[in-house]
Image (tube, rainbow, N blue to C red):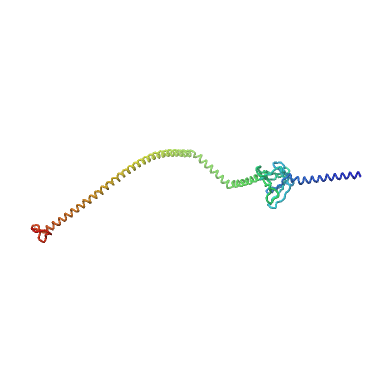
Amino acid sequence: METEGRYTLVGTLVLAVVTLMSVAIIWLAGAADTIAYQTYTIYFKQQSLDGLAVGSPVKMRGIKIGIVDGYRFASNQEEAVAVVVRIDEGAPIHDGAEAYIKRNLVTGIGAVEINNGPGTNPLLEDAPKGERYPVIAEGRSDIDKVATAVSQLAVSGATVLEKMDTLLSDENQQALASTLANLSEISGHLAANKQSLNDVIQGIRDASDEFRFAGASISQAATRAEGSITGIGDNTEAALKEAVVAMEQLQRESAAVSARIQQLSETGTLELTNVSRDVRVGADALTTAGKRLSNPRSILFGPAGQQLGPGEKLP
């Protein structure tokens, strides 16, 4: 009976320990992870995921802050792989963060490296429409940037080599040799005619000096001409003033002459009227005298009876 009692006690203790271990495992695998981690999704499209596996570390500035929880091929993005990562809530991820794949150069094991966004940005907590978790954007590693730069440099180098090959073609080499020969011939002629060139240069210098002196003379002449033109302008202004005065005097004299002519015209008209009247009276007297002279008898013996006027009588 005592042996059975011991077995029962041992069995009970074993069951209690197993139960406690099971509860602890369930708690560590479920509730603890939910509380301690924040889950994010990263869509890798430009980078290879070689060396990355479930459980691979997620790092920020070289410090492990989480693990890769899983990955799958994205159905809504062409050739993209959706990697789900769990990150410690003590490492806040800000909006604008970027993730890229970083590999160990010796082992080739990959890890997810995160470049966090600016600290002034809000935390990345909201999941986009149609997503279960917040999405961290894909970035580029320094190695990728170097590889891209090297690739561009290689392309540029190939282009330069191609252009150099074209430049050093047979035709261009012949043209270059001909150009060098011509330059050599020209330099020989220049060396042979050094004295003539010196004479030409001296002539150019003399001509430039003469031009400079001519320019100075032209400047002086222009200054004198400016003074003369100024004097002529002053004389012209004085002459114009005198002409204005003469015109005003002539206008006044013309007005006086016009008044005198008008006065003489009126006086002459009156005198002509008087003369006309006197001429008419004289003409009447001459007519009467003519009539009397036409009959001498009446002059000698007096007028006849029929020639007497009213009230006249013969003597």
Quadrant of the drawing holding the C terminus = bottom left
Q: Position of residue 251 (x, y in %)?
A: 30, 46
Q: Position of residue 165 (x, y in %)?
A: 61, 46
Which quadrant of the figure has residue 207?
A: top left
Quadrant of the drawing holding the N terminus = top right
Q: Residue furthest bottom?
A: 306
Q: Residue furthest front?
A: 311
Which quadrant of the figure has residue 219?
A: top left
Q: Position of residue 119 (x, y in %)?
A: 66, 42
Q: Nearer the viewer, residue 190 or 122?
A: 122
User: Left or right: where does residue 238 sit relative to residue 296?
Assistant: right
Which quadrant of the figure has residue 36?
A: top right
Q: Nearer the viewer, residue 86 or 50?
A: 86
User: Left or right: where does residue 34 sit relative to residue 226?
Assistant: right
Q: Position of residue 213 (x, y in %)?
A: 43, 38
User: Left or right: where does residue 139 sit relative to residue 205?
Assistant: right
Total number of numbered discs in the rendering: 0
136 to 297, vertically: above or below: above
Q: Nearer the viewer, residue 274 or 151?
A: 274
